[in-house]
Image: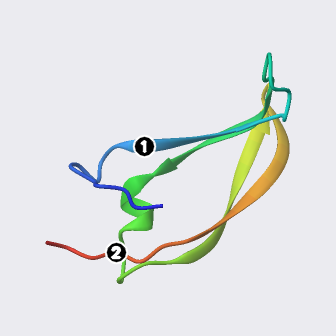
Amino acid sequence: MVLDVKYIGDDMTVRILDENVFDSDLVCEGRIKLSALCVNGGLDEWHQLDFKGQKAGMIHLKTNWTSH
C-alpha cells in the first residue's frame, strides 16, 4: 500500500474486520502515529491492536519512507 502523507503529525487508524459479507464486525483496531513510520528511511515494527480497550493482537508493519 502507498500512503501519500501530507502531515506526519497525523495518526493512521488500522481496523481489522471479520469476513462476514453482509455485516462486517470490528475485530480490533489501533492508531499509529505517521511520524513513527517516517523515520530513518522506514521501519520494521509490531504495533498493538485493541478491542474494547483490551489487547486483541498485533500488526507487523514494514515501511519505506521517501521524501519528494
Camera-side residue of 2 and 59: 2
Q: Residue at x 13, y 72 (%)?
A: 68
**Amino acid residing under circle 2:** Trp
Q: Residue furthest front?
A: 21
The answer to whether residue 3 is above or below residue 50 is below
Q: Residue at x 36, y 68 (%)?
A: 38
Q: Residue at x 83, y 43 (%)?
A: 55
- Residues at discs 2 and 1 in contact (Cβ within 8 Å): no
Few, some or many residues within 10 Å of mark 1 (<14, 14–19, 20+): some
Instruction: Pick whichever of labels 2 and 1 is earlier in the sequence.
Output: 1
Residue 4, given in percent of the width and then of the height, sits at: 28, 55
Numbered-mark total: 2
What secondary structure is marked by label 1? strand
What secondary structure is marked by label 2? loop
Q: Which numbered circle lies on residue 11?
A: 1
Q: Nearer the viewer, mark 2 or mark 1?
A: 2
62 lies left or right of 47: left
- What residue does disc 2 label? 65
Few, some or many residues within 10 Å of mark 2 (<14, 14–19, 20+): some
47 lies left or right of 18: left
Camera-side residue of 36 and 28: 28
Q: Residue at x 19, y 73 (%)?
A: 67
Q: Residue furthest top?
A: 23
42 lies left or right of 56: left
